Amino acid sequence: MGSSQGSTLSSNMAGFVDGSSARQEVSYIDGLPVYVRELLSGGAAGAFAKTAVAPLERIKILLQTRTEGFQSLGVHQSLKKLMKQEGVIGFYKGNGASVLRIVPYAALHFMTYEQYRVWILNNYPGLGSGPVIDLLAGSVAGGTAVLCTYPLDLARTKLAYQVVDTRGNFHSGMRSLCGAQPAYSGIRDVLTSVYKEGGVRALYRGIGPTLIGILPYAGLKFYVYEELKRHVPEEHQKSIVMRLSCGALAGLLGQTFTYPLDVVRRQMQVENMKSPIQGDAKYKNTLEGLTSIVRNQGYKQLFSGLSINYIKIVPSVAIGFTAYDTMKRKREREGETTVVYFLRWVY
């Protein structure tokens, strides 16, 4: 038995040294369907980009939803206050839901974009193969990804909206009165509690402005990105700097155009957590939300946190696009896989 174990160990070590084990892993991943490899590329890129800007995303949500104590603060002051009240972990509150959402969201977005593009080209050849196809495919891909992952976005917002100070008291927008405001302990708690309160419909509260915003945002993002790349000389097409710049500019334009809808969405997502004395009405639809915010909170509220979004969207979108493009190119090379390259990217 000792001899048999020794032979097995020697064989495994030999395989490790000569690289045969690694090649088997490469062959296994390379043998996966193209859709699975697209999921790996898009999901890994999206999760990495989202985590990198999680602290800024938390502050943006607090400003959009008019959380008590943060309305009049700048980015630096808000970060300092959050650090004082919740510590470093407070910067990543709700990030678990965000990562769980962004992995399938980014994966579905990138994967379905390419699939929708091929489908449109095959079924509507009269549209040609230019920017119009990129716009249509990007818009539909964005809508598909949102519908599949929206409940996790709802959970992310509700968790980020809750603020716990250093004394351990719970706050939700306004100070909690005798524990009347709902306090969620985690993703599962949010999803189960919301479902019990209002069913599936409650899990999709705010989906209206989300879809209205995500379609033009996703379309413009992909459209501008492809347009910018077309104007780059061929010898610079593979440049990391080029892809970073194109991705950042595409994201900035799309996000700025649809930002007021994002504010309406966030306020609709947390409206049941607000204290009655805040006086914020519940919005029946997107148009009512926009008009009510302008009338009761001022038009500037529609752009509250936009400066944070400018800071956030540059690394977020740029890293997402670049990581996806780079990993896609790398995995096509012999001896490289999406997983292996992404580990190198992160570490």
Image (spheres, rainbow, N blue to C red):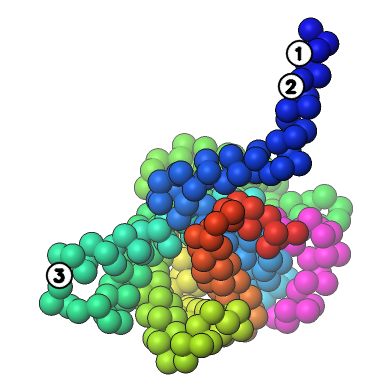
- Marks 2 and 1: CB-CB under 8 Å? yes
Disc 2 secondary structure class: helix
> Dot 3 corresponds to which residue?
124
Neighbourhood count class around disc 1 (C-alpha, 10 Å): few under 14, some 14–19, many 20 upward: few
Residue type of the residue flagged with mark 2: Thr
Residue 8: mark in rendering: 2
Residue 104: tell me if it is visible: no
Disc 1 secondary structure class: helix
Observer-nearest of 125 and 181:
125
- In three-dimensional space, the C-alpha distance between marks 3 and 2, rounded to whole angstroms, equals 58 Å
Part of the protein shown in magenta? 72-95
Residue under the point 63% across and 75% down: 315
Observer-nearest of 22 and 173:
22
> x%, y% of residue 268?
47, 62
> Dot 1 corresponds to which residue?
4
Q: Is residue 149 left or right of residue 74?
A: left
Neighbourhood count class around disc 2 (C-alpha, 10 Å): few under 14, some 14–19, many 20 upward: few
